[in-house]
Image (spheres, rainbow, N blue to C red):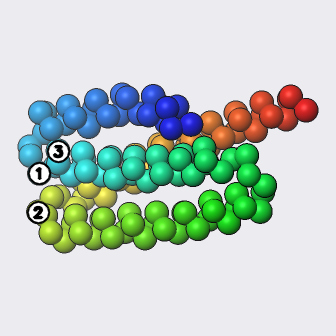
Amino acid sequence: MIKYILRLNVIPMIASVLALFILPVDPAVAIFSGFFLSLIFIVGNAWVIDQFWDADSNTFMKVFFFSMAVRFVLVLAAMGILLGLTKIDEIYFTVSFIISYLYQSVTEMIFINKILQQRSSQK
């Protein structure tokens, strides 16, 4: 699943890197940081799904929701540190984080749906 997520993020990754050359430094760094912070969150989620997908449903749910809470706290801490210690543009950072997080969440849900459809058709 991690390879799938990363493959779908090639174009947004290239766009965020190109933003470093096209936009002024502050907005470009903010966009780049927002995108990669959300990518780290989603890749962490994909790792948990890869590792625990075949576990029994009770274990999977416990691990999944615990990891979601831990990742949420870590992302909030990273956002706080990034916005508190640096002078990046908060608006650009927040908008790029939200847009990229929504994009990546939708692609992740589509992939999980495909897995579930394949498993139901095999039964």
Residue 49 location (% of width, % of height): 61, 48
> Taking 81 as reference, is 49 left or right?
right
Task: Identify residue type, mark 1.
Answer: Asp
Residue 92 location (% of width, % of height): 24, 53
Residue at screen point 30% across, 52% down: 34
Crowd tier of the residue under label 1, counting other residues whose Cα lies within 10 Å: few below 14, some 14–19, many 20 or above = some
Circles 1, 3 touching at the beta carbon (< 8 Å) = yes
Residue at screen point 52% across, 69% down: 69
The residues tagged by marks 1 and 3 sit, at their Cα atoms, a distance apart of 5 Å
Residue 87's label in the rendered image is: 2
**Is tag 3's residue or tag 2's residue first in the polypeptide sequence?**
3
The residue lying furthest to the right in this view is 123
Task: Identify residue type, mark 3.
Answer: Ala
Residue at screen point 48% across, 51% down: 44
> Taking 87 as reference, is 17 left or right?
right
Q: Nearer the viewer, residue 119 or 110?
A: 119
Residue 28's label in the rendered image is: 3
Circles 1, 2 touching at the beta carbon (< 8 Å) = yes
Crowd tier of the residue under label 3, counting other residues whose Cα lies within 10 Å: few below 14, some 14–19, many 20 or above = many
Up-down: is 64 above or below 81? above
Q: Which residue is mark 1?
A: 26
